[in-house]
Image (cartoon, helix red, strand yellow):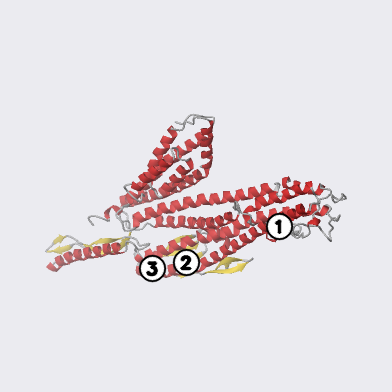
Amino acid sequence: MGTINSAFSLISGALDADQSALSITANNVANANTPGYTEETPNWQQNQPIEINGGSYGDGVTETGATSLRDSVLVARLDQQQQLASASSARLTALDNVQALFTPDSGSISSKAGDIGSDITSFFSSFSSLEANPTNNALRQQVLSTATTLAGDISNAAASLNSQRSGLDQEAAGVTSQVNSLTKAISQLNLQIQSTSPNADAGTLEDQRNEDISQLSKLIGINQITTENNGLSITTTTGQLLVSEGSSLQLTTGMVGGVTDFFLGGTDITSQLTTGGGELGGYLTARDTDIPSVLSSLDQLAYNVSTNVNALNNTGTDLDGVTGTVANPLYIFNQPAPGAVAGSAASMSVVMTDPNQIAAAGLGQGTGDNTNAVAMANLANSSIVNGQTPTDYYSSFVSTLGATVSGVQAENTAQNASVTQLQTQNDALSSVNLNDEASAMTTLERSYQAASQVFAMLNTIMASALNLGDQTAVS
Amino acid sequence: MASNPEGIEEKRAMLEFGARRELPELKELVMEASSALARLDANRLQELALSCQALNRALVPANADERAVLASQAREATEEMAVFARVLEATRANLNVMNRLRELRAGRLEYGQVGWVPTESRHGND
């Protein structure tokens, strides 16, 4: 080119570039409140120099599109932390419900699972009362009444736990359709991105894909693998393929052992999803680990109390002078099959209807004897449940549950804090605002340094406070 | 990042916090610190650091009863300290990631690699 047209070309090129840049800026402003939108900046490409009469004049610039200000590493870490936070949130909600079940209802006289601790005490105390007057019908009735309350509270607790487990099962199954919808959308976006922007940032399309991945991260644990031409494959955290560029695999469900299992391409991946993270991981951990663990402890308590009390009552003599036999046992509680601990809590009930059948007297003793009532009262202080007394076992079980809830709470707080922090950093980098990245980094560093000081100081204060022998303030 | 740069809300909260009791319970201090760190509220954290310094200086129990109260408070705050430690740990991990990203960017700028748009140049004279 060597004409006046070339000069005009240079000028109009610059004007066009400015116009395009303005258009990108306007787009940024218009989308300032669009979730997941990433600020775009214009890309400038230097033009070939223009030769006019042998001289080289300028080169001008051309606007060649926009680049989104996103950082894939930061976004990936945000997604990863989101998976963990979602998992612990879902698990914590479930555990809170379980813990609420075992919280004593102070002042209530109605039958409640939370009263199991006091029920155990009342039940064995009723035998202590019977010792003093073993033929008293009211005291015998009191034994059956406290036994009924104890059995009712334990079986109600088991029923509530099973109900909560079913609820979690449904919640988990409900996630499947959301996951499938998102993986399908991501695969379609992959195709669009690969066809329109194989070598550059795809702007809005990539925003949409990132937003979908973020949503997917809240639901299940995933890994992202960047592929050719700006494509993306997504797997579960244990490597099962969910999205392979333009195609997606559908997650399916099926009932296995009374609960919903999850399948990918015919393979049962329930256990992998459980440890993977996301809401689904949290639901499955609560469904398959936490609640079964609580149920198992409750089963153990019910089994050992029932079998030990029944065994003693069966060897004594009741008010009618009868002693239990194999054919006609004198059982207070429904007797579990030998070794059949599982399900003992749910099936715990009082089978004895006649208070005269309480065998307060010892074998071969007169009906006014109290030897067996003493022995049954002493069960309260005997290590009959996994080496602990019934009350200690129950207290220990409730404490363990509390510690689990507390641990998950701590985990969840830390993970949510991490997500909030990363979101702040990501917003500063990729959202449409006036704060720049350096400012966000400074805030993060200042916060960390100040928090470290606070932590060290609090640690010192607490050590000092706990060390009562040292009465002076720490310096 | 602080939600209100002027720190008005933090100052108000601090005044209310101080007005509630002369010696705030350790548990509350620790919970407040975790929360401020989650929000990246550097101003609030710096205020808390000063509060803790003052508390540490004033920590001279006059008698056995006060020492017992203080020891009890410390025991009650143990769980919250565990939470605070976790949040601090998560923050350190995030800071490491951000520092690493910054180093990567700096490296790209230094060696002029293609594909990186310096954030500093995206406003102003473009």
Q: Nearer the viewer, residue A351 or A81?
A: A351
Q: Nearer the viewer, residue B25 or A166?
A: B25
Q: Badge 1 sits on which subunit?
A: A
Q: Position of residue B61 (x, y in %)?
A: 49, 31
Is residue A166 visible from the viewing direction of this image?
yes
A455 on left or right of A438: right
- Whether A353 is drawn above or below B74: the answer is below
Q: What residue is pinned by disc 3?
A: A194
N-terminal label among 2 and 3: 3
> Disc 2 vs disc 3: which is toward the camera?
2
N-terminal label among 3 and 1: 1
Distance from Cα at disc 2 to Cα at disc 1: 55 Å
The quarter of the picture where the C terminus of chain A appears is: top left
Which corner quadrant of the image does residue A252 belong to?
bottom right
Residue A148, numbered circle: 1
A212 on left or right of A260: left
> Disc 2 vs disc 1: which is toward the camera?
1
Residue type indicated by callout 3: Gln
